[in-house]
Image (cartoon, helix red, strand yellow):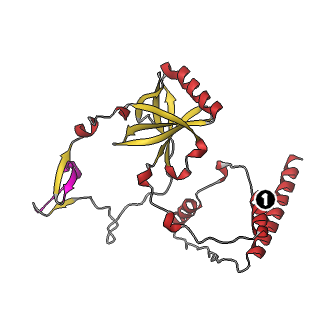
Amino acid sequence: MARAFWKGAINFGMVVIPVRMYVATKIETPRFHYLHKKCLTRPKQVLYCEKDDEYFSTKETVKGYEYAKGHYVVLTDADFDNVPIKSKHTIDIMGFVQSEDIDQIYYYDSHYLEPEEIGTRPYCLFRDTLTDTNKVGLAKVAFQRREHLCSIRPMEGILVLQTMHYQNELRPWKELEPEKEELKPDELRIAKSLVNEMTIDFKPEEYKDEYRLALEKVIKAKLQGKEVVTVEEKKAEPAPDLMAALRESLEKAKKKSEAEEKAEVGAKK
């Protein structure tokens, strides 16, 4: 586990729970660099000032907020550190909600919360209470130079803090609403049967980033001087007969389920 990037406390009423926060996710994808096409050399990043006609490095920069066109106010690291807000070191629980009341579109990142040694007992109390009530804590916490709206929920013995978008950060979707369609009862019945037939247990270990794996094969092939073989994709087109497409899909799903059941029974013997 990487080092904790934030330390503070959860305030649950009058209960204080000292915790450490860790990043819970990582993106695994091959890294690429810009190279000079002529000689494949990595260029040095330089900045140019037209006013002074000189090049400079990022070390010679400051952060400026443009309050009017071409006019800036400069903020230092001390200015950011001294922002007068209590959530810099405190996760203050504002209330509790049913987890299903928060639409998934609001979530965007996850972090693990671990108790400090003196906070183990209240941490366990808070975790088990959330588990038994099937609720999540709604809170705010400041890190990475912004205050995050977040929820806290239990997951396999630990607490997970999930950062959330504010309402004003969501782009409007009302204009995307499709035209209303009058669906036939048989269409809905077969579609529901297809969903039921295709219902599975979520096993995250079974899913891989196929694009990343294929890209790594492309890189390996180029290193070995081999020709990269492309896979022809089948173009997706709407079915002319919706009912026929539903029935065919349902039949295929049933055959797949039967085959998987036979394979599972054979494996147990």
84 left or right of 269 in image: left
Measured as percent of width and height from the top left, residue 228 is found at 55, 72
Residue beneath disc 1: 197
Measured as percent of width and height from the top left, residue 11 is found at 45, 27
Q: Residues within 10 Å of mark 1 (few under 14, many from 20)?
A: some
Q: Is residue 65 magenta?
A: yes
**Three-letter code for the amino acid on which mark 1 is drawn:** Glu
Measured as percent of width and height from the top left, residue 239 is found at 70, 77
Measured as percent of width and height from the top left, residue 117 is found at 49, 21
Q: At 21% from the left edge and 59% from the top edge, which residue is drawn?
A: 47
Which residue appears farthest toward the right when viewing the image? 269
Q: Is residue 229 magenta?
A: no
* Whether residue 77 is visible: yes
**Region of the chain picked out in magenta, as a range:** 52-68
Which residue appears farthest toward the bottom when viewing the image? 240
Q: At 47% from the left edge and 41% from the top edge, which residue is drawn?
A: 150
Who is closer to the viewer here, 128 or 41?
128
Who is closer to the viewer here, 181 or 110?
181
32 left or right of 61 in image: right
Q: At 77% from the left edge and 57% from the top edge, which residue is drawn?
A: 196
Which residue appears farthest toward the left when viewing the image? 52
